[in-house]
Amino acid sequence: MKLTFMGAAGEVTGSSHLLETPAGRLIIDCGMFQGHRREAAEKNRRFRFDPLSLHSVVLSHAHIDHSGRLPLLHKKGFGGNIYATNATRDLCSIMLRDSAHIQQMDAEYINRKRERTGESPVPPLYTTSDATKVLRHFVSVGYHRRFSPLPDVTATFFDAGHILGSTVARLDINRDGEPFRLGYACDLGRAAMPILRDPELITDDGAKLDALIIESTYGGRHHDPPEDMEAELESLVTRVVKRGGKLVIPAFSVGRTQNVLYYLHKLFAEGRIPSVPVFVDSPLSINATDVFRMHPECYDEEAADFLEIEGSVFTHRSINYVMSVKESKKLNRRRTPAIIISASGMCEAGRILHHLKNTVTKKRNAVAIVGFMAQHTLGRRLVERRPKVKIFGKLYPVRCEIATLNGFSAHADHDGLVAYAEAVARPDTRIVLVHGEEKGTTPIKSDLIERGYADVTVAEPGMEVELG
């Protein structure tokens, strides 16, 4: 048996891990690489394995850095099952087609340039047709329901508490009649976060893992307590409105947008922030919010109670959903206070770029960073408080307030990751760290070794690990 790390090895995107057993091959996740555009495009176009050789895919959740290359996998000939939860399948239905639309628009833009220089056109990574067809491969599986992605593998999904439908997975492998337990905890959520239930342990029966693949995105860092988020958001909204500005929040369409909406709705309902219009300006975010409404079975007790009292988690008289480009453009002409939530979360594409262009140069405005920003992204440059940032090829001075609200992160922090590993792994369990940059993986590895874990490895692209 062997694991080969095809993505999210030494970086935070492109999650994809190949498992080979005597009965066949499967991959855990099939994510898109994000970051520097040219480098990401080159990585996304090629697989390190033959798609035709795969028996199945085990999909942890719908975020594009975990699911985004599934349409390309289908396009390259993959014909097996894609196992995911019901909510993940519903989210992928909208997210993969949205991703395909972006691939097609990017290809059209590039090809107009190539045509002027006499170069041959470049096809999109995949099309909306590919994204629609790959949905036929999905097999929906509920939490705690056993399934067999390979004849010698039995898998079980547990709630990761990361986004709607997200999972940590346990794969019980029959190794010459002896059981071998592999755990996959990437991405792992946080306890006491809004809307979703807390992360569950993979080892529900008390038997610990033989090997664990775990993320390290926030290794060496510590989140603000979830209970502080309301107060921080309340303070930020109040001071921006007081000075007559706009608050722009770049947010991932799935998970982060809904968390922000939940807290804003709660603050409005309790009269803790001024009555100011909120605009959700992202068709994908709006469609994703509809999927959230469809799956109240994923809610935690607090969100379920809020739903009973308010009648809706994501609907309030101050919250407006913006679909059309015309309505979106109007927002940039507003001269009165407003809150604008828009995608993409890392500020690399979409309507958020137009809002940032019209926001960052004015002192009365603010940008709230509510999630992780990968290297080489506009979002990272804002977090670093660069004096000028490039948007649509033009430099803009950053004069607005940049507020980093770490409490909104849907990833476990350093202490959360170490605690989870300790709960599910023995001292001799083989632990592999993925989905993190060096500044995250190094402190996690050091901490685990200090706690007595003898076999801790940081994954590298293409690295192979024998499981016995």
Image: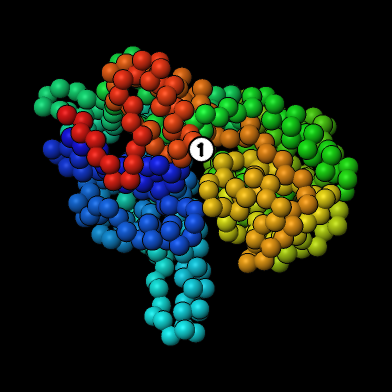
Q: Residues within 10 Å of mark 1 (few under 14, many from 20)?
A: many
Given residues 298 and 337, the one toward you in this image is: 337
Residue displayed at 27% across by 23% down: 210
The percent coordinates of residue 214 (x first, y second) are 39, 31
**Is residue 425 depicted above or below 182 in this figure?**
above
**Is residue 326 depicted above or below 425 in this figure?**
below
Residue displayed at 44% across by 27% down: 444
Provide the residue designation for mark 1: 164
Tell me, yes or no, if residue 133 can be seen here: no
Residue displayed at 15% across by 22% down: 178
Does residue 344 appear to the left or right of 46 in the view shown?
A: right
Q: Quadrant of the N terminus?
A: top left
Q: Quadrant of the C terminus?
A: top left
**Is residue 464 depicted above or below 70 in this figure?**
above
Picture quadrant of residue 370: top right
The percent coordinates of residue 243 (x first, y second) are 88, 45
Given residues 30 and 418, the one toward you in this image is: 418
Picture quadrant of residue 328: bottom right
